Amino acid sequence: MVKELEFLEEQNIRPSLIRAVETFRQSHPVDPAVAYRVTKPVMPFYGKEILEMGIAALLNGENLLLTGSKATGKNVLAENLAYIFGRPSYNISFHVNVGSAELIGTDTFVDNQVQLRRGSIYRCAQYGGFGILDEINMAKNDAVSVLHATLDYRRSIDVPGYDKIDLDPAARFIGTMNYGYAGTKELNEALVSRFLVIDMPDQNEETLTQILQTTFPNGKKEAIRQFVGLFLDLQTKAENGEISTRSLDLRGLLAAVGTMEQGLSPLLSIRMGVVNKCFDEFEREIVEDVVMTRIPEEWTREDIFA
């Protein structure tokens, strides 16, 4: 078995899916010119059902749309899927200035000649990459029009002034979106129909424990249990509308634990990674109270790491 797929076996992913992924990887070798884009994710994704859904959809030639609230691991899943399939990945973060030129390409001068400087979608199509369309519900109409033809059964892109290019058979696109962020909008029905949709579940105790134990293998069980509890407490308060989702930041929590490993006081670390993400004084006090119930003031590095 390919080393990268051992992780799937550990999560008891169906053997038939693992074999199909192996076949896919053998059938679609990566062009050496973009081999550097096949990168191992910093964090593994844990969740058997979600992984099986994603793998099955991509094997069937479909594109994926990952929806859900903050800190559910949408980008982590997208990066893991690209790595599992052994594909070069192209991250496209949508914002108000991203248009068709950034996606397809734009004219530029090379040796006094006009040539096309290829955009991310063009290169993804050419090399059979996995395009990660981050915050796709922030895409403006100019960018959405490019996605329509790229994502449907035509699997082709018309490049104005040049020619039509067909997508490599290995090319796939994975969109991610959060609800309610500033600048977001509802996706139109035509665009959504081009995806299979996975609604990402909230983090639970099991997955959080796996993430923390994998990221910090020398962390003590009791300390990891308290960090998991802290995140889940904040998640519950956010769901109940007591606080915003600003402090519900898994990246921030992991970064905070990392600074503890460097020797910084746990309370100061949590303040940087979690508490100070709240800019409202009242909300910050609520988060601080939750932290104090989980992280003893006298804790030091030795209480957290073996």
Image (spheres, grey):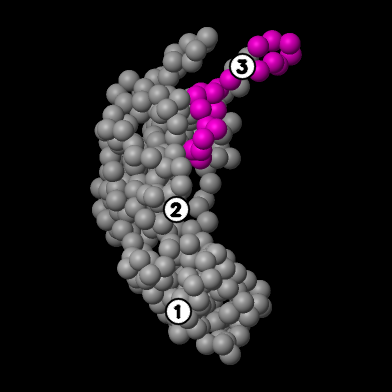
Q: Nearer the viewer, mark 1 or mark 3?
A: 1
Q: Is residue 35 visible?
A: yes
Q: Quadrant of the C terminus?
A: bottom right
Can you identify the residue that label 3 sits on? 107
Which amino acid does the dot numbered 1 rest on?
Answer: Val
Query: Is residue 140 found inside the magenta-colored segment of the image?
Result: no
Q: Over which residues does the magenta segment extend?
A: 89-114
Q: Rounded to the nearest whole Å, what is the CA distance between mark 1 and mark 2?
A: 27 Å
Q: Rounded to the nearest whole Å, what is the CA distance between mark 3 and mark 2?
A: 34 Å
**Residue 45: percent from the left, percent from the top?**
41, 57
Which amino acid does the dot numbered 3 rest on?
Answer: Asp
Q: Are marks 1 and 3 in contact (CB under 8 Å)?
A: no
SS state under label 1: helix
Q: Nearer the viewer, mark 1 or mark 2?
A: 1
Q: Is residue 127 visible?
A: no
**Residue 87: percent from the left, percent from the top?**
46, 39
Can you identify the residue that label 1 sits on? 290
Q: Rounded to the nearest whole Å, what is the CA distance between mark 1 and mark 3?
A: 54 Å
Q: Residue furthest bottom?
A: 298
Q: Are marks 3 and 2 in contact (CB under 8 Å)?
A: no
Q: Are marks 1 and 2 in contact (CB under 8 Å)?
A: no
In front of the other: 232 or 11 = 232
Mark earlier in primary sequence (1, 3): 3
Which amino acid does the dot numbered 2 rest on?
Answer: Val
Image position of 228 with respect to 66: above or below: below
**Disc number placed over residue 76 in the picture, else none:** 2
**Residue 94: percent from the left, percent from the top?**
49, 38
In front of the other: 102 or 122 = 102
**Residue 144: percent from the left, percent from the top?**
41, 28
